[in-house]
Amino acid sequence: MTNWQIFSKGLIRENPTFVLILGMCPVLATTTAAMSGMSMGLATTFVLVLSNMVISAIARFIPDKVRIPSYIVVIASFVTVVDLLMAAYVNTPGADGGPSLYDQLGIFVPLIVVNCIVLGRAEAFASKNGVWPSFLDGLGIGLGFTLALTLLGAIREFFGAGTFFGLPVLPASMNVLVFIMAPGAFIVLGYVIALVNRLRKS
Amino acid sequence: MVFTLGAVCLVSSALLGAVYRVTAGPKAAAELVKKTFAIGKVLPAFDNTPYEDMFKIPSADGGDSLVCYIGRVEGREVGTAVQTWTMKGFNGLVRLMVGFDAEGKIYNISVLEQKETAGLGARMTEAAFLDQFRSLDPGAQPLRVRQDGGTVDALSAATISSRAFCDAVQRAYDSYLNHKKGPASDAVSGATEVQ
Amino acid sequence: MEYILLIVSAIFVNNVVLSQFLGICPFMGVSNKVSTAMGMGAAVTFVMTLSSIVTFLIYKYVLAPLDIVFMQTITYILVIAALVQMVEIVLKKVSPALYQALGVFLPLITTNCTILGVTLLLIQKDFTLVQGVVYAVATAVGFALALVIFAGLRSQLELADVPEGMKGMPVAFVTAGILALAFMGFSGMV
């Protein structure tokens, strides 16, 4: 596989959200708006890239029996780093007094630890490949995840709140509230997966 | 085997410790900005740091205690922000910060946390709803929505959320009043006693 | 009364899967048969109760006094992983029958975000130990309930005539959406 293929497969062909259906909790929970979906995606990408690189570098020194616990420790460390950074630098309340970005994502930032995508890539790719390919793999999968979250967030925000990245587009009378409520998350995701399946076939 | 795992743990703890030390300052600053932001919104202009000028009062109905922050201008009390809550929201917990001016009237309210339905109950965070509470005196007229014979305009299609909102504000007022009346009332306070 | 509110709220109003979006992977993954769904639900309840107690005590008596709260995530995930391993070993020795029933689900539980999520939420919500345990058990029951109902729906779905493109995951998600819509009816109950 060329480097380009390693990077690009995560974007569409093996998109973690729409094709592999992995790590669904943040996909549903943080996509009430395009902005929060995108931030969640980028935070996950950060963890994915760094943990992939470190794990690919140390994998051959780690005995098989403690492989998974060691990987989890590495991943959890980077998650905590992201959590601390976000608590420090994206934690100012919005102009209207709304919750800060860090508060909007809330518990789903520490929960990146149990996102199956991260441990899955460590196990399936990083532990068997070099640092550079693992970096590309992490970046590709991470951006594919970010793309999916941003798309879902944009759809739900557009129909539910009539805005696009916070900019008003539709009048309030045309909002379909169910899109930004819990059921809307499941239903929009279901239809988008169906659409992606259809596009991949043709 | 144990050695490798131990080494991994040790290295990552060292990394975390370092990042923690770097981010501790900005993180605390961000938390402070968040707190003072909410307090600043619900109190008249003040020149002290209400975040440090805080005390706890027992809730009027015997539940968890409420945290109060005093705003002062040149040491004279201009208002008190009471952090209050209700469990009666459409989806449970709603937390508010209610600011009372020196006369014990509501100065302003800000919503700290809510899980109400988006577009219905969640609109309690909008100024259009919040502004009707300004300069109301919950002692003269208990806060109730119109449907219950009160004067508060409920959010359309979200009477339960509006009722919960009034419940939280009333709890703040009653607890605050108990505190001012009580023997433990703040001696430094220059505020007029509310009847 | 306070505990009843807490329980009803955690099971129905703020259902962990359908309104808080925790544990979606097992919700989608092991909901093909009602019996497996029940097994998974029981295993989660068991591990959730144990881990909420252990992590709560670790937080109160180790992390908070030593002022290393930032190690919370990493400690919790290791504790949960170790606990799952231990439960597996003990169960194998003590009750082979129970192990037969729950065994296959146990390894899956480490990466079930319901467990880590709830243990983190307990601290965030400032619960006491008793409140925390009640909340953890109720949340796990809510998880099991959603899982079993959904498994029932999916077994019906197999007989339905679903359009080609919607088969499999898409229709499962839409069904879950409708189930979430039904659970919204519980809002405003407490």
Image: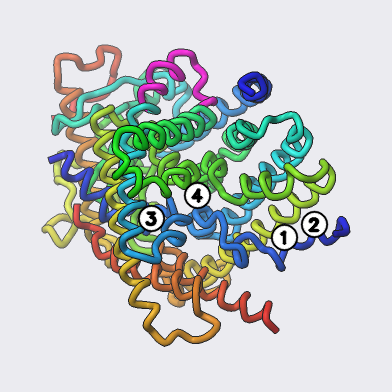
Which residue is labeled 2 in the image?
A7
SS for callout 4? loop
Which residue is labeled 4 in the image?
A96
Magenta stretch bounds: C56-72
Nearer to us in this view, A174 or A31: A31
Which residue is labeled 3 in the image?
C17
Q: CA distance from mark 3 to mark 2?
A: 33 Å
Position of A76 relative to C163 (above/below): above
SS for callout 1? loop
- Report the magenta stretch's main SS: helix
Give residue C115's position: percent from left, percent from top: 41, 41
**In the shown orientation, is residue B178 left or right of residue A25?**
left
Which residue is labeled 1 in the image?
A10
Q: Quadrant of the C terminus of chain B?
A: top left
Asked if badge 2 and badge 4 are on a common chain, one would say: yes
Asked if badge 3 and badge 2 are on a common chain, one would say: no
Nearer to us in this view, B79 or A65: A65
Marks 2,1: beta carbons within 8 A:
yes
Asked if badge 3 and badge 4 are on a common chain, one would say: no
Based on the picture, tell me whether residue C23 belongs to the magenta stretch: no
Q: Amino acid at mark 2?
A: Phe
Residue drawn at (36%, 65%) of the image: C33
Q: Quadrant of residue C7?
A: top left
Q: Amino acid at mark 4?
A: Asp
Q: CA distance from mark 2 to mark 4?
A: 39 Å
Q: Residue under mark 1: which chain is it in?
A: A
